[in-house]
Structure formats: structure tokens, C-alpha cells
Amino acid sequence: MVKFLKIFSVSAREGTVTRKYPFESPLVTPEFRGRIDIDPVKCVGCGACTRICPTKTLTLSYEGDEAVLKYFIGRCIFCGMCAYVCPQNAITITKDFELASYNLSDLYDEVVHRTVRCSICGKPFTTAKLVREVETRINGGDVEELLNICPECRRRLTVRRIGSRVVGTGGE
Amino acid sequence: MNEEVLSKYGGLTRVINYDVCIGCYTCEEVCKFIHEGMAFIVLYEIGGGLNKPISCFHCVKAPCVTACPTKAMHKDKDGAILVDLSKCIGCSACVAACPFGIPEIVPPGYASKCDLCNPLRKEGLTPGCVSMCPTKAIVWGDTAQVAKELRVRALKKLVYKPV
């Protein structure tokens, strides 16, 4: 009984530790993970985040000349794996957790990229920004025209080039 | 001399000699068998009904290694370009960088390519495609020895060329 009364001395010393949340700022720890934020300027549309995402919250779909990176908050488990793998550091984890909405479209976030069409077969194979990014990384190591050819056509082209010189058949 | 050549040209080289290749698909099937259904040496038609294989060239100055943001693509002591699966994030930068279109992104999401049969090489064996090629079209070994072998073959072709 006397032990129970100790609580009064503790509360008198510490004061109020809870927050009047809707009227004050919420109590979030520095490690707290809320929704993610994708920087459309830094993002190159490589799709590393979509491959690591355990719940397929992030998806990258090719629709004609556009590659759409879609983020659906309704399925996100806030694991932060996407921000960990992003090679461009385009994804940041925010402290935002007040995500309820009457409108379903509020739960979607989209980043639209322009795709590159293969100059031989005409199939869109990657985003234009990724090609530019790789070009700067390898710093002129590749021939410019090869960057705009899809991997499958690059193989065929190489085989034909070597073949035409060594065996003397086919040609480019 | 050998030490110098090894350090300069990255040790061992594999060359596919299209002159003697008969396009029999043995290398592709062997690779598929060793790598659990995925072939990393694939044959393509070069015209005239002939099929010739293409696989990773294991470049000395490889664009995929330069483009990789996590250093998952690396060169081992034999000069083979390998993917470190614990580091690979599947960003497909290597796919965009390779001038020959060799690396592939495979499920669940990492780059995969010819590893010159790393487990076999560790046991002191030659890569599967090299040892199974019926016409010895795929040559693998010390850069200097391979160059010598190819010179001998070119010379033989010149000398014994049917008129």
C-alpha cells in the first residue's frame, strides 16, 4: 500500500510525460520509419527498390514511352529496404505516419520516367536517365550508339561483327 | 615475363575461336546443366545458317565493374568478373553498361553472368564449356599461352588452306 504511494512522488518530480497529441506534435523517435519519399530528380528508374521490396509496394511498369515507378502506401510495411538499396539516395524515410485518407489516390505516389527504345528492335528496354547515369559513370568507355541498343540486340550485333570478320558470313 | 603479363592483362583468358566452332550447342547445354537451367554462353545466328556462341569476355577494363555502384561486380585473382550476391542490389547498371549485353537480372533481383565456373576452377578444373567443346574452339588459360595457341592455329590455317 505504501509502495503504491511512491508513484505520486515520481510524478511530481517528472511532470507530465504524455503528449496532448492532436494538438501538439507527436512523439516520434529518431529511428521511427514512416512513409517513404522519392526524389524524382535523383531517381533514375533503375528498379533496385522494386526488386528488394518484400511486399511489392514499389512497382516499375513500362507503358509505351513511359516507365512508371509506383508507390502504394496501403501495402507498405515501412521496412526501409528501398532507401537502403537505392544507389542514387533518391529515397528518404520520412517521419510521416498520419496517412489515413478518404481518397484512395492519396495513397499512391508516382514517378514517371522516359524510356529508351532500342535503335534496332524498337523495344523500350530501360529509362533514359539510367543510360545517362551509366554513361557518366563509365566516362566514355562505351560507344555512344551501343548505349541505345537493348542487351539482346547488343549480343546479336557482337556475334555478327565477329562472325563477319572471322568466318566471312552474314555481316552487319 | 609471366608475372608481368599476368598483372597487366588480368591472368587467364577465354577465347572462342569462331573458325573451328561448329555451332553444336554443347557449350550452351553444359552451361545450362552446371548453372541449374541458366545458360551463360548462348548461341546466336550470324547469318548463312551458322550459329556461334557468345559469352562474357571478362574484359580487363570492364565497364560493368566501373558502372557498379556497390562494387558487387569485381575481378577475381584469375581475371574473371564475378558478381558478389551479398552486395548486388539489382540496379541493372551493369546491364546498361556492358557493350555486349552479357549480364542479366534474374529473380529475385540480382545480376547474373558467366563466372567461368568458379566452383570448378576452385577444384583446379577447367570451365565446363572449355572442357566439353568437341572441336576445342573454346580456349582458356594463361593469356600468353592462349595468344600463342591462336597464332599457331592461324598459321596452320594459312599453310594448310585448301586451294
Image (cartoon, rainbow, N blue to C red):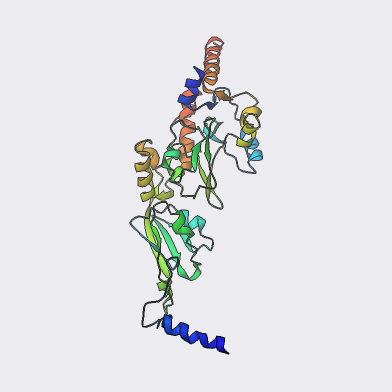
Q: Looking at the image, is A54 positioned above or below residue A5?
A: above
Nearest the eye: A117 or B120: B120
Residue A20 vs residue B138: left or right?
A: left
Nearest the eye: B147 or B142: B142
Is residue A18 in view? no
Q: Looking at the image, is B131 positioned above or below residue B111?
A: above
Q: Looking at the image, is B159 positioned above or below residue A85?
A: above
Is residue A159 in view? yes
Nearest the eye: A103 or B48: A103
Give the residue furthest to the left.
A41
- Identified at 46% across, 58% down, the residue is A82
Horizontal and vertical percent for residue A100?
Answer: 44, 77
- Identified at 56% across, 86% down, the residue is A3
Horizontal and vertical percent for residue A56?
Answer: 51, 62
**Residue B133's image quarter?**
top right
Dividing the image into 4 quarters, which one contains the C terminus of chain B? top right
- Identified at 53% across, 51% down, the residue is B109
